[in-house]
Image (cartoon, rainbow, N blue to C red):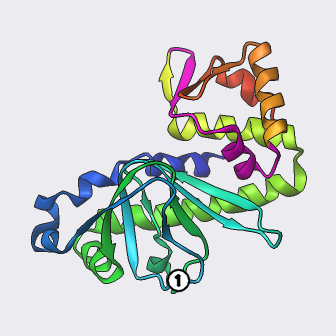
Amino acid sequence: MADAQQFWFLEKINLKSLFCPTKLGAAAAEVEHRIFPKGQYIFLPGEYADKIFLLEEGRIKIGSYNESGKEITLAIIDPGEVFGELPLAGVQHRRHFAMAMEDTTCCVLTVDMMKGLMRQNSGLSFLLMKVIGSRMLDMEQRLQSLVFKDSRTRIIEFLVDLAMKKGHRMGYEHVVRKFITHQDIANLTATSRQTVTTVLNELEKNKLITYNRRRLLIRDLDALQRLVPH
């Protein structure tokens, strides 16, 4: 678990600061800034992967569809995070889709440009490789969770993970801004919207969390963690 927490700490680093015009130098003029309206796909499975994206504003959903057409959400990307990074590991075609969850602005770099920046900046190279590694580790952990844990446990585990990755500590409490919808949680945990609602209401009744569409407040993260069997 310690290794996983170290990985996720790296994901909290805001990569946007590494792509300011001063640090990009001559490459700054080649960087494309694109606006994607809510609901628009940034890329789709099977497309040639020749660009890397840095989210400046908005939120991005990374996901796929199973054989029956049901959406499976793999990750929610927040500002300052990179996505579409697998070409750096040799992947030539997209395996998943990326869709704007709200009006979104992205910094778009070609793979060749990013590789050039990585050669110039060893810290950037190290960080991006850790991001790729952390996401692979997360996928492995999620697969184990799907196989060995029930729906309720997966939802609670997701809330704990969310607080640790993207929450802000306020005394004994943790607050997550821009809380996602029940359907998004269901897609991320391979459960149903109804099950998510039932579990969240149970946790709120037991005074472990409070939530609305704008935020999630976890009153006692340790108590919530104790509900997840190890």
* Quarter of the C terminus within the rendering: top right
| Residue 83 in sight in this render | yes
User: Picture coordinates of residue 113 (x, y %)?
Assistant: 27, 78
Up the image or down, 134 lies above or below 176; here it is: below
Q: Is residue 229 visible?
A: no
Q: Which residue type does callout 1 highlight?
A: Glu
Give neighbour class at mark 1: few <14, some 14-19, many 20+ (Cα, 10 Å): few
Give the residue displayed 47% in from the left and 53% down from the top.
38
Q: Is residue 177 left or right of residue 46?
A: left
- Seen in the picture, residue 67 relative to 50 is either above or below; the reply is above
Q: Position of residue 77 (x, y in %)?
A: 49, 52
- Please tell me which residue is depicted at 46% across the width and 51% down the height of the picture: 11
SS label for mark 1: loop
- Residue 76 in percent (x, y) is at 55, 51
Residue sitting at 68 percent across and 20 percent down? 209
- Image vertical order of residue 55 relative to residue 203, above or below: below
Residue 119 rendering spot, x and y as whole percentages: 27, 77
Compared across the picture, whether 140 is left or right of 115 comes to: right
Magenta-drawn stretch contains 123: no
Position of 198 relative to 166 (above/below):
above
Magenta stretch, residue numbers: 171-192
Q: What residue is shown with label 1?
A: 47
Q: Is residue 124 left or right of residue 65?
A: left
